[in-house]
Image (spheres, grey):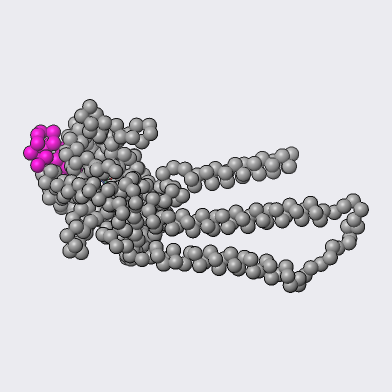
Amino acid sequence: MGIRFARCWRIAAVALSGLTVAGCATGRLDATKPAGPNAREIDGLMRLSGWMAVGVGIFVAAAVATIIVKFRAKPTDDPDDLPPQIHGNRKAELTWTLIPTIMLVGLTAYTLPVVFDLAKEGSGRTIKVEGQQWWWQFSYDLDDDGQFDDIVTANDLVIPTGEEVNLELHSRDVIHSFWIPQLNGKRDVVPGRVHDWRISSDEPGVFYGECVEFCGLSHANMQMRTIALAPEDFERWKQDQLDGQAAAQAALAEGSAVAAGAALFETHCISCHVVDGTYESAAGGNANLLAGVAPNLTNLMSRTAFAGALYETYLQGPDGEYLRDSNGNLVLNIAEMREWVRNAPDMKPARADNQQGMLDFSEVLTDQDLDHLMAYLKTLGSPPVLP
Ligand code: HEC
Ligand SMILES: [Cu+2]
């Protein structure tokens, strides 16, 4: 009975560790598929140390097996007879000291340059990254005046390919950690400090990331993505973002549903959210939130995801391809965005009572209000530029 029980546990443990290992290589966070030079350097190190460990593991397993077979007690042996003792054997001691030393020195020689190289500043532009419970903000300084106020966005970090982009990591509340495994390793994001980091991608693509330092209730839902665009697409994205402000204002004149939505927005939403050029009262960190800011909604429609990249802004098919309507336009994920506006804490755990996260409006807004608000939100920004 006891033995059977122990065996069950052992099988379960093996199965569990198998699943754990499998979990490392699946899904959207995959450090084994580097897309840029920084991540490739880390991947190279990981592979080198991994193969060394495999070599050592095979050697030790083979040695143990050989010793078990070769030196096992024979029925004729006297159990009190000790085999020859080799304590202080010079040759053996030297061998098992020197070989690991050479391996570790080699690994260090390979690691140190990578560590120093990753700490260097890149040659490309700088983007400010701000972590707060439980989403990421990205700000761009296009006119080089040292103010990161030209484009302010959330969830989607858009970069041009082939450029070493510098990130300035800030936290508005607790410690977070920034990780986009296909573009570089992890970097802590600490309140009161500025940490530099850099990412780059050779090819256009979407690379997923997460906060990897436990930061409270919705830590697991604090995701982001990097959208790497070819340089000409990046320029187009930049122009779209800059045009967003004027578009948001123009839309207000558009018609009754949009205007009614804007009026509701003005009543319920601008204590936290900014729409550049239209609603800026929450700007400057005065929002009714511990972090002081909510996502800037000027170009909401240009982002592929919302709510800490937990939800897709546009509908996708089973293989992740974007659905399009008969005019070839992306199809807004209106159901989830409407539900988010109605009752956000139900879609993503938050603590609105403690000024953390978006409020629950389910008791405040009627169905018609929600339709009007959605009509207004739909005017905020043009569709995303996709790689
Ligand atoms: C108390 C402050 C507060 C108020 C008021 C508020 N929000 Fe929010 N909103 C937030 C915060 C914080 C987030 C980010 C939540 C997250 O991702 O966890 C957010 C996220 C959003 C998002 C997703 C944006 C993105 O890029 O992730 C939308 C859309 C949104 N709010 C719409 C509204 C609308 C519409 C109203 C008014 C009916 C409103 N909000 C009122 C704080 C607020
Ligand atoms: Cu976090």
Residue at position x 67%, y 56% in the image: 59
Residue 164 sits in quarter: bottom left
Location of residue 328 with respect to 122 vertically, above or below: above
Residue at position x 68%, y 53% in the image: 61
Q: Please indicate, yes or no, whether residue 375 appears anywhere in the rendered image.
A: yes
Residue 57, position in %: x, y? 63, 55
Q: Was residue 155 drawn as part of the magenta stretch in this picture? A: no
The residue furthest top is: 326
Residue at position x 76%, y 55% in the image: 67
Residue 163 sits in quarter: bottom left
Relative horizontal placement of residue 154, taking residue 183 as reference (left or right): left
The residue furthest left is: 253
Say which quadrant the C terminus sits in.
Answer: top left
Residue at position x 64%, y 41% in the image: 11
Residue 108, position in %: x, y? 52, 66
Location of residue 257 with respect to 109 vertically, above or below: above
Magenta stretch secondary structure, dominant: helix
Location of residue 141 with respect to 343 vertically, above or below: below
Which residues fall within the magenta stretch?
250-269
Relative horizontal placement of residue 210, taking residue 127 as reference (left or right): right
Residue 158, position in %: x, y? 28, 50
Residue 328, position in %: x, y? 23, 31
How many numbered circles does the render carry?
0
Q: Nearer the viewer, residue 306 or 47?
A: 47
Say which quadrant the N terminus sits in.
Answer: top right
Location of residue 271 with respect to 261 vertically, above or below: below
Q: Was residue 265 drawn as part of the magenta stretch in this picture? A: yes
Residue 379 sits in quarter: top left
Q: Please indicate, yes or no, whether residue 297 appears anywhere in the rendered image.
A: no
